[in-house]
Amino acid sequence: MTLARKIAATYAVILGLVTLINYLPGLTDAQGRAFGIFALDIYDDSLHFASAAWAAISAWLSTRASLIFLRIFGVLYCLDGLMGLAFGSGYLDLGILIYGVLDLPFFFKILANTPHIALGGFAAAAGFWLGRDEPAASRS
C-alpha cells in the first residue's frame, strides 16, 4: 500500500471518529458542544461521514484515487476553515447560508476552524507533494 493510500485510510478513520463525537457519552457538554467548544449538527455529521466514506473508498481503490481525494478534500476543507476563521461560518456544512456571518470571538474561531485548516492543509500538501513524485505507472 502506497503512502497516499495509507494517508487516505487514516483520514477515513479520523473523519469516522469525528462523525461519532456527538454520539459518544462524555464528549459533549450540556449544551451539546463537542469538548465544550463547538456544536456539531446534522450537516456537520453528514459532511464528516461523506468525507470518511470518500477517503475509505479512495484508499481501497487506488493510489490515484487517494491522491485525487487528498487534493480535492484538502483544498475544500482548508478553504472552509479559512472562511470560518474570517466569517465565523464555513460553506461545506452550509453554515454561511444558514447562519450567515457570525460575530464570534477570534479565539473561538481559531479553536473551531483549526481542525479544518490543519486537516485540509496537510491533505492538500500530501496529495500534491506525493503526486509529483510517483510515476504514472505506479498509481494503481
Image (cartoon, rainbow, N blue to C red):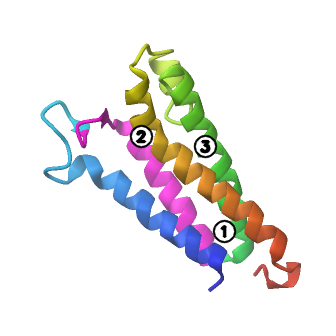
Indicate the amino acid at tag 3.
Cys
For label 3, the SS is helix
Mark 3 or 1 closer to N-term? 1
The disc at residue 66 is 1
Residue neighbourhood size for the residue with mark 1, other residues' Cα within 10 Å, grouped as few (<14), some (14–19), many (≥20)? many
| Residue under the point 23% across and 37% down | 36
Image coordinates of residue 104 in percent, x first then y, are 40, 18
Quarter of the picture holding the N terminus: bottom right
| Residue under the point 64% across and 78% down | 3
Residue 90 makes an appearance in the image? no
The disc at residue 44 is 2
Residue 53's place in the image compared with 91, above or below, is below
Residue 139's place in the image compared with 125, above or below, is below
Indicate the amino acid at tag 2.
Asp
Residue marked by disc 3: 78
For the magenta stretch, what is the residue range?
34-60
Quarter of the picture holding the C terminus: bottom right
Q: Nearer the viewer, mark 3 or mark 1?
A: 3
Image coordinates of residue 108 in percent, x first then y, are 37, 29
Image coordinates of residue 79 in percent, x first then y, are 63, 38
| Residue under the point 48% across and 59% down | 52
In the foreground, 53 or 14: 14
- What's the CA distance linking mark 2 and mark 1? 22 Å
Q: Nearer the viewer, mark 3 or mark 2?
A: 3
In the foreground, 50 or 24: 24
Mark 2 or 1 closer to N-term? 2
Mark 3 or 2 closer to N-term? 2
- What's the CA distance linking mark 3 and mark 1? 17 Å
